[in-house]
């Protein structure tokens, strides 16, 4: 089993690149943002709880997110591997993920970090906000709060995996295809 985390700030291109990577390498895509938006769309209790946090650009509590991931890993034991997109976002989530994977005798093989400047992140998200209908893209203050959450709580996740020598960083600015080529080259070293 091959497991990769696509890591980066909001708007760094994780979702865009994940689609292409899972298709090319036949991995199971796990995006906590997509899972939470689907819970909101179907009006579940979990979705209602998550919405208050997401609309304000802050992280949903660890216990909610870890519970969702646990079920997904358990239900997809036959997968060739997982691509985690937007998860883990705190050190507590990273530690929980390591434990969950260990139950299947698996681990995170590599964390690929997309490096994008803050001004480019804001430009991309404001641009998407014009058409996406995502409430957290509509307002620059909320976009900046998401980036602040990333700096305060999520960057430490990269430090956590650096201790195990698992982090590879790449330039996340340039064309989608150029970035995809760099990502693919890293994944191919492991698969
Ligand atoms: P989530 O859905 O994960 O969103 P995010 O990380 O804030 O970032 P995005 O999905 O907006 O960006 P991305 O890096 O995927 O970039 P994308 O490819 O979309 O999280 C939303 C919220 O859910 C969080 O704020 C939190 O509240 C909650 N949440 C989710 N996971 C959680 C967790 N684990 N724990 C707690 N809470 C959690 O691209 C962005 C834009 O840029 C697009 O318009 C795209 O077309 C464009 N673009 C992409 N690549 C390029 C390029 N190379 N050049 C130019 N434009 C590009």
Image (cartoon, rainbow, N blue to C red):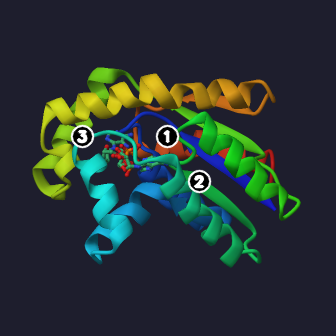
Q: How many marks?
A: 3
Asked if residue 58 is positioned above or below residue 62 in the image, the reply reads: above
Q: Secondary structure at mark 3?
A: helix
Which percent across, then down, holds residue 156? 58, 25
Give the residue at mark 1: 178
Q: Secondary structure at mark 2?
A: strand
State whether residue 137 appears in this view.
yes
Which percent across, then down, holds residue 73? 68, 68
At horizontal 46% and vertical 46% (from top left) the residue drawn is 14
At horizontal 57% and vertical 33% (from top left) the residue drawn is 113
- Mark 1 closeness class: few <14, some 14–19, many ≥20 residues within 10 Å: few
Say left or right for 85 vs 45. Answer: right
Does mark 3 have its CB less than 8 Å from ligand 1? yes
Give the residue at mark 3: 125
The residue nearer to you, when weighing 154 against 80, is 154
Mark whose residue sits in front, 1 or 2: 2
At horizontal 27% and vertical 56% (from top left) the residue drawn is 51
Which percent across, then down, holds residue 135? 17, 51
Lower position in the chain sequence, tag 3 or tag 1:
3
Does mark 1 have its CB less than 8 Å from ligand 1? yes
Asked if residue 120 is positioned above or below residue 61 in the image, the reply reads: above
The residue nearer to you, when weighing 183 against 8, is 8
Say left or right for 70 vs 43. Answer: right
Does mark 2 have its CB less than 8 Å from ligand 1? no
Q: Quadrant of residue 164?
A: top right
Q: CA distance from mark 3 to mark 1?
A: 20 Å
Q: Secondary structure at mark 1?
A: helix
Give the residue at mark 2: 84
């Amino acid at each position: 089993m091959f497991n990769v985390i696509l890591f980066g700030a909001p708007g760094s291109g994780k979702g865009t690149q994940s689609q292409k990577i899972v298709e090319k390498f036949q991995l199971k895509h796990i995006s906590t943002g997509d899972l939470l938006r689907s819970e909101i769309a179907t009006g579940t209790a979990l979705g209602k709880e998550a919405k208050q946090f997401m609309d304000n650009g802050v992280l949903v509590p660890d216990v909610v997110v870890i519970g969702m991931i646990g079920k997904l890993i358990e239900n997809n034991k036959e997968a060739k591997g997982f691509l985690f997109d937007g998860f883990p976002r705190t050190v507590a989530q990273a530690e929980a993920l390591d434990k969950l994977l260990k139950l299947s005798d698996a681990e995170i093989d590599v964390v690929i970090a997309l490096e994008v400047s803050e001004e480019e992140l804001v430009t991309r998200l404001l641009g998407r906000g014009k058409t996406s209908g995502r409430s957290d893209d509509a307002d620059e203050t909320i976009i900046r709060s998401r980036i602040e959450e990333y700096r305060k709580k999520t960057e430490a996740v990269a430090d956590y995996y650096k201790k195990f020598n698992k982090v590879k960083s790449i330039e996340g600015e340039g064309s989608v295809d150029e970035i995809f080529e760099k990502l693919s080259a890293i994944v191919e070293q492991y698969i």
